Amino acid sequence: MLGTPLLDAEKIRNDFPILQTQVNGKPLIYFDNGATTQKPQSVLDAILHYYTQHNSNIHRGVHSLSQKATEQYEQARATVQKHIKAASPNEIIFTRGTTESINLVAHSFGSFIFEGDEIIISAMEHHSNILPWQVLCQQKKAHLKIIPIQASATLCLDTFKTLVSEKTKLIALTQVSNTTGVVNEIEHIIRIAKQKNIPVLIDGAQAVPHIAVDVQKLDCDFYCFSGHKIYAPTGIGVLYAKQNWVEKLSPYQTGGGIIKTVSFEHTEYVSGALKFEAGTPNIEGAIGLAAALNYVNQIGMHAIFLYESRLLQYATEKLRAIPEVLLYGDVPHKAAVLSFNIKNNHPFDVGTLLDRQGVAVRTGHHCTQPLMQCLGVPGTIRASFSFYNTLQEVDFFVTALKKAIKMLS
Ligand SMILES: Cc1ncc(COP(=O)(O)O)c(C=O)c1O
C-alpha cells in the first residue's frame, strides 16, 4: 500500500503558489490544514476573474453584469449541492463559515426550544458547536447534555443512548474531531435519533475536506462546513438544511435580499435558501468555494481519502516509535489529523522549535477546552495533513521533532 501512487502530490503542489515559499529560511512544510488550507491557483484565478470580468451585485439588477454575477453565485450553490449530494440547491445556505452556520440554526431552530428541553452535544466539540447551544439553553432554561469520551478519545455510545429521551430536541455533533481526527459513528447516532424523531446537526468542518459526504444518505437535518478548510477563501461557509427546515425556520438576520414584499405593517419573505442570506452576500467567496470543490473533485474525494490515510498511517507509525511522544485519539477510524505531546514539555515550546525548522503545526487547546480537560492536558501539538503533503515532508517533520526533543531535554 505504501508504494502505491494514489495521486501525484508533487504535481498537485505546483498548483499551490504558497507551497513554493520559505519560512525562516526553510522550505515551508504546512501541517496546519485543520486550521485552514492553502489555496490552489484555480481558486485564486476564479476570484480574480470574477472581479475583473463580472463584479456586480446579485439578484437585483437587470443589467448583464448583475445577471452574470447572479448566475455564477447560483451556480456555486448548485456545485455545493452536488458535492454534498443534497436534494436541492434550495437546501444550501451560504454563511460566513461553520460558526455562523451553527449560530444560524441555534437562533432560528431556537424558537422550537422550551424550558426543560434538552440538547445533546459531545465532549469533543469545537467551541463553535458548544457556545451557541450553551447560550440557547441559558436563554430558554433548557439543558445541555454531554456525550462523554472514553480513554481512547472516542465517544461513549452506551452513555449516549442513556442521554436520549423524549426531552431531547436536538443532537449537535462533530463528524470528525478537529483536535484528534477521530471520526465519529454519526450514521449510527443519526439512526438512533431518527427512531425518536430527533433532529440532528452535524458539524462537518473537519470532515468535508477529507471524506466524501452524502447528506441524503446520512439523513441529517443540518450539516455545516467552512470553505477555507476545503481550499476556498475565508468568509464563506455552508449550512445544509433539509427542505422542511428551510421552510419552517425563520430568517436568522433580516434586511435586503430576503423579501417578497415589505410594508411598515407586514413583510413577506422569499422561500428557499435566500431567506437566510440577508444583505449582500460573499459573492467572490461562493465563486471561490465552487472553484475549490471543482478542484478537489478533479482529484477525487476517494483518492484524497486514501492518500491522506496513507500519510496519517505513515506519520502515526513514526511518532509511535519515539518514546517521548504521547498520542491522543490513536484509533483506526480517523481523518488525517495527529494530536500528541512530548512528555514533560509544553506544546508551545515544541511548536516554536518546529516552526524554526520551517514546519507549521498548531499548538494549544484547538478551541476544544472541554476536550483538553477530559484528556487532562492544557493543550496538544496538532499536525493535520492535506493531499499536497508528502511522505518526505513527514520524514522531515519527524527529524525536526527529534531535534526539538533533544534541545528541550
Ligand atoms: C470541528 C470544527 N467546528 C467548527 C469550526 C469553526 O470553523 P470556522 O472558524 O471556519 O467558523 C472549526 C474550526 O476549526 C472546527 O474545526
Image: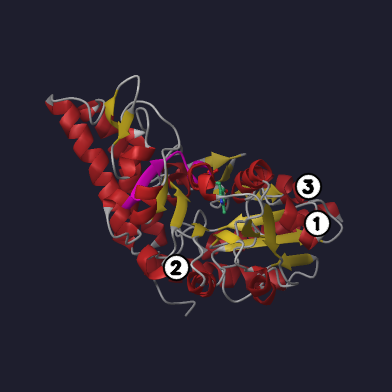
The residue labelled by disc 2 is: 305
Q: Residue at x 64, y 62 (%)?
A: 180
On the rendered structure, is 360 left or right of 325?
A: left
What residue is pinned by disc 3? 349
Q: Nearer the viewer, residue 241 or 183?
A: 241
In this view, the residue farthest toward the front is: 265
Query: From which residue to which does the magenta span run?
Result: 91-103
Crowding at mark 2 (Cα within 10 Å: few <14, some 14-19, many 20+): many
Q: What's the distance in space between the residues labelled 1 and 2, CA to CA? A: 30 Å
Residue 7 visible from this viewpoint: no
Given contact means CB atoms under 8 Å apart, are the residues at marks 3 and 2 in contact?
no
Q: Is residue 193 above or below residue 140?
A: below
Q: Which residue is mark 1?
A: 377
Which mark is first along the chain, 1 or 3?
3
Q: How far across and down, in percent of the image, does residue 347 sit?
A: 76, 51
Q: Is-magenta flag for residue 102?
A: yes
Q: Is 175 a magenta residue?
A: no
Residue 356's place in the image compared with 124, above or below, is above
**Residue placed farthest to the bottom in the image?**
1
What is the quadrant of residue 252 in the picture? top left
Amino acid at pointer 2? Phe
C-beta proximity under 8 Å, tags 3 and 1: no
Which percent across, then down, holds residue 367?
Answer: 66, 47
Q: Which mark's residue is nearer the viewer, 3 or 2? A: 2
Q: If the image is split into quadrants, where does the C terminus sit?
A: bottom right
| Residue at image location 75% in from the left, 56% down from the top | 372
